[in-house]
Image (cartoon, coloured by chain):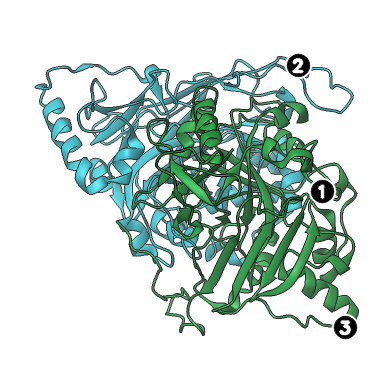
Chain colours: A cyan, B green
């Protein structure tokens, strides 16, 4: 089944069931109002949602309406955990090669993963607001899973068993802020702003044969301003499958229902397939041309990410986001802070 | 006022209001059932809780009962964000000196902060379970704040304005797993297991003059197995106050209601005051004696953290946790994973 969260003015939105072809939707009212509620009580609530999904696909749901991705928040507008792996080694290799570094020998056995902020996700069509265009604004085309409860010490098979839903992610990254945070060793706080997620989260059975052993075998299409940037195969080059990423996270702690685990930027060794982010293209240019030629994103650019199935239908719906923010750097004040107005008020 | 969350078998527990002297409590039923709900709607709900608090302190609350910290979950048993600063430079200096490193010049102007897991916190009296005693089990005595909504780009004053509640934290750390994760640069995933929080979260006004400009001026007492380890002054040596830590986090993203921001291990230049963790003591021993003498924690050890006010009353209640887990390393299986049984089942 496919689930989405409709904007209703509340922090957590309203849960809707979406038809397989993403044409119609139906409020899950009477079953559950929020997706986290379903994840907290999956075995009881998900069969009821599945029944509604079947009825909706048959065109028999009484109060169905046209599905509008622009009404969507992230499927979980806020979550208790967002841990993002970096499971595609070509992404790491390129980025490191550009700065003269190589992958450590452990790269094939020990996943890289960072803990990200999960209190404020962006919806699939939300503008992404950045305080300065000089921060090196970049997207990252990723797949992600939402888990049920996975106990501390779980192995990769138990990790796989814990997967409830799959979805698309755009892990916005501020490349010019990355080096200083990497050097500190404490992970990414300022260089990884709010992540966006695709309109629908889908159960693994929806992928059919494309879901194999914790990997999604399909092509992730990335474009900027309508021009293709990447057509990347998400399957065979995922060094660590989602079950392994979950096991890595669960080594010393329980992973609780509603945790979102990301794949990292989908990437292929074959550069002809393009890239799921700008920084990889710049890294390839740096090696081939002597310097990067492609600029990072500018205010007003639009990023689009989507994966279509063998039937030609969009699996997860599309992420379509406009980069927004001040056109030029605002003058810094006395303490060096950026005083540009925030995009969203406090309570 | 002082708020706590009582265990009731649910994931989020039941909100209770606790008397100033921590002797009695009262369910907040009729106002709010969960603390996150109050943080989401603070201006409307907190005055009602304050009224109940006043009545409770006067001994006039009809259904008051004896407050029992052992019934407490963490005030937020799960949260949308846990970002832990490292605001006390003596802690950093000692740990780095022990491995032959020094603080970078930016240490006094750019806070260290890591994003931690927030899906599964421990209550103040919960056993802390670790899969192996060889991981270098250590506690970290910290203060933390819970925020309301703070907008992206907020400055330190706006960060201070966003503080709703203060509480104690024990940021469990696995020292032997830290170096490998620091080297990866992506922050702490396995070396920072579930954090524990003190029984009550308190509004800043409860601290009176001890709350000044985003710092808590009071002594944090740490002990292991009843022996004092530290009597550390939390006030003057906090290099970055809580408003500054929040502003650091908010530079590129909104900080949403219910975010918890930690101070890092409370630490003083004067080693005679002792330490809020084991690793600092070991670092001092390494310099003075040539090698660390104090072992990390062993299975069965008990850690106790508490801060008392000028009136001699416990401000936040005490964290009292027993270290639990297997006495010796379980044999590793073929893929090197630890197969010790998890402390908590899946759904």
Residue highlighted by disc 3? B289
Image spot of residue A29 (x, y percent): 23, 26
For residue B219, above or below residue B205: below
Residue highlighted by disc 1? B235
Rounded to the nearest whole Å, what is the CA distance between mark 1 and mark 2? Answer: 40 Å
Image spot of residue B302 (x, y percent): 59, 73
Cβ–Cβ under 8 Å for marks 1 and 2: no
Q: Horizontal placement of A231 versus A158: left or right? A: right
Rounded to the nearest whole Å, what is the CA distance between mark 3 and mark 2? Answer: 56 Å
Rounded to the nearest whole Å, what is the CA distance between mark 3 and mark 1? Answer: 30 Å
| Of pointers 3 and 1, the one earlier in the residue sequence | 1
Cβ–Cβ under 8 Å for marks 3 and 2: no
Chain of the residue that carries numbered disc 2 in the rendered image: A
Is the residue at mark 3 from the same chain as the one at mark 1? yes
Nearest to the eye among marks 3 and 2: give it: 3
Nearest to the eye among marks 1 and 2: give it: 1
For residue B207, above or below residue B279: above
Is the residue at mark 1 from the same chain as the one at mark 2? no
Image spot of residue B123 (x, y percent): 50, 57
Chain of the residue that carries numbered disc 1 in the rendered image: B
Query: What residue sits 86% from the left and 21% below the top?
Result: A333
Residue highlighted by disc 2? A328
For the residue pair A221 and B22, the one nearer the viewer reads as B22
Q: Horizontal placement of A73 versus B194: left or right? A: left
In the picture, the quarter occupied by the N terminus of chain B is: top right
Of helix, strand and loop, which one carries label 3? helix
């Amino acid at each position: 089944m496919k689930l989405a969260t409709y904007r209703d003015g509340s922090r957590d939105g309203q849960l809707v069931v979406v038809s397989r072809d993403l044409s119609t939707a139906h409020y899950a009212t009477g079953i559950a109002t929020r997706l986290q509620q379903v994840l907290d009580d999956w075995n009881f609530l998900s069969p009821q949602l599945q029944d509604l999904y079947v009825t909706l696909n048959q065109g028999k749901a009484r109060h169905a309406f046209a599905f509008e991705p622009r009404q969507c928040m992230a499927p979980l507008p806020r979550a208790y955990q967002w841990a993002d792996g970096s499971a595609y080694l070509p992404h790491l290799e390129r980025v490191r090669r550009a700065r003269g570094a190589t992958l450590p020998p452990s790269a094939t056995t020990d996943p890289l993963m960072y803990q990200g902020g999960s209190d404020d996700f962006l919806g699939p069509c939300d503008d992404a607001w950045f305080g300065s265009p000089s921060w090196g604004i970049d997207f990252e085309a990723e797949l992600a899973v939402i888990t049920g409860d996975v106990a501390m010490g779980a192995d990769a098979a138990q990790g796989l068993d814990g997967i409830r839903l799959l979805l698309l992610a755009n892990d916005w990254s501020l490349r010019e802020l990355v080096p200083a945070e990497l050097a500190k060793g404490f992970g990414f706080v300022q260089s990884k702003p709010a992540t966006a997620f695709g309109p629908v989260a889908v159960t693994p059975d929806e992928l059919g044969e494309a879901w194999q052993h914790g990997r999604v075998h399909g092509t992730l299409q990335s474009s900027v301003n309508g021009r293709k940037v990447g057509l990347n195969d998400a399957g065979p080059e995922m060094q660590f499958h989602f079950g392994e990423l979950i096991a890595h996270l669960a080594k010393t702690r329980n992973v609780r229902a509603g945790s979102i685990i990301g794949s990292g930027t989908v990437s292929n060794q074959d550069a002809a397939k393009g890239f799921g982010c700008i920084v990889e293209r710049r890294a390839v240019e740096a090696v081939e041309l002597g310097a990067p030629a492609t600029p990072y994103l500018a205010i007003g650019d639009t990023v689009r990410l989507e994966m279509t199935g063998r039937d030609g239908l969009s699996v997860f719906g599309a992420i379509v986001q406009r980069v927004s923010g001040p056109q030029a750097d605002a003058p810094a004040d006395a303490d060096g802070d950026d005083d540009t107005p925030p995009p969203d008020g406090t309570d």
